[in-house]
Amino acid sequence: AQTVTQSQPEMSVQEAETVTLSCTYDTSENNYYLFWYKQPPSRQMILVIRQEAYKQQNATENRFSVNFQKAAKSFSLKISDSQLGDTAMYFCAFRDSGTYKYIFGTGTRLKVLA
Amino acid sequence: DAGVTQSPTHLIKTRGQQVTLRCSPISGHKSVSWYQQVLGQGPQFIFQYYEKEERGRGNFPDRFSARQFPNYSSELNVNALLLGDSALYLCASSPGWGSTDTQYFGPGTRLTVL
């Protein structure tokens, strides 16, 4: 069974600095998708970034980028120039190409400090 | 365009009662998924529907059921409520049944079982 592990329950970062959130996953599939979702205190889950496993190039969305290491089954999220609005729970999620069930990690609570 | 909407926002029930939660997907989206998010945890997959047919089911008891209507909206029903059913119930929609489709989440319904 696929699993997603986020080993950092909580993290904090100073405003304008860079922070990296870790995620590892386990699967025997070769084709799959990985996501980072953000859930602010208002609770609506927002897609931050996605990565297709068949793409070697790491995905980037403005200040957000990933370090995707397929062999190591690692998918970390780097947030550059952190802003107060980045304060939220961040969930790593996995989806294989055959089903559309998302498997989520337990989340990392990120606090950006002024 | 409006995002995924869910109703009600909050709900309080007692053990043994039944509850119905509602979800309207983003206009044009034909797939709806339901997730249960217990406090402090990541969302757990319950159901997925596409074109009014069940396409996936998570590891939840038969007390949980769902359906999708011709307008692609969806209802999640939970019978014989238990204290452990207290959670945030999230609905997510996606355009179709393609491997590139990404799910977009609603704000959730907070269910409290007393």
Image (cartoon, rainbow, N blue to C red):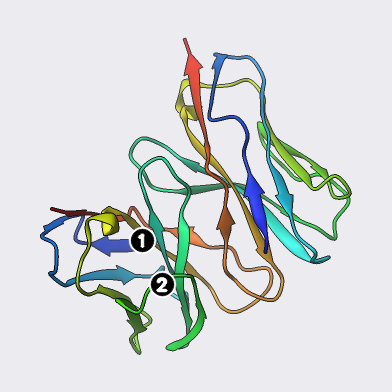
Q: Position of residue B87 (x, y in %)?
A: 30, 53
Query: What amino acid is at disc 2?
Result: Ser
**Mark 2 belongs to which subunit?**
B
Up the image or down, A107 lies above or below B3; here it is: above
**Mark 1 belongs to which subunit?**
B
Up the image or down, B15 lies above or below A14; here it is: below
Q: Position of residue B68 (x, y in %)?
A: 36, 83
Up the image or down, B76 lies above or below B44; here it is: below
* Residue A39 position by quadrant: top left
SS under mark 2:
loop
Label tally:
2
Instruction: Locate residue B60 relative to residue A74 in the image: left or right.
Output: left
Q: Which residue is mark 1?
A: B2
Instruction: Locate residue B43 relative to residue B69 in the image: left or right.
Output: right
Label 2 neighbour load within 10 Å: few <14, some 14-19, many 20+: some
Query: Which numbered tag is attached to residue B27?
Result: 2
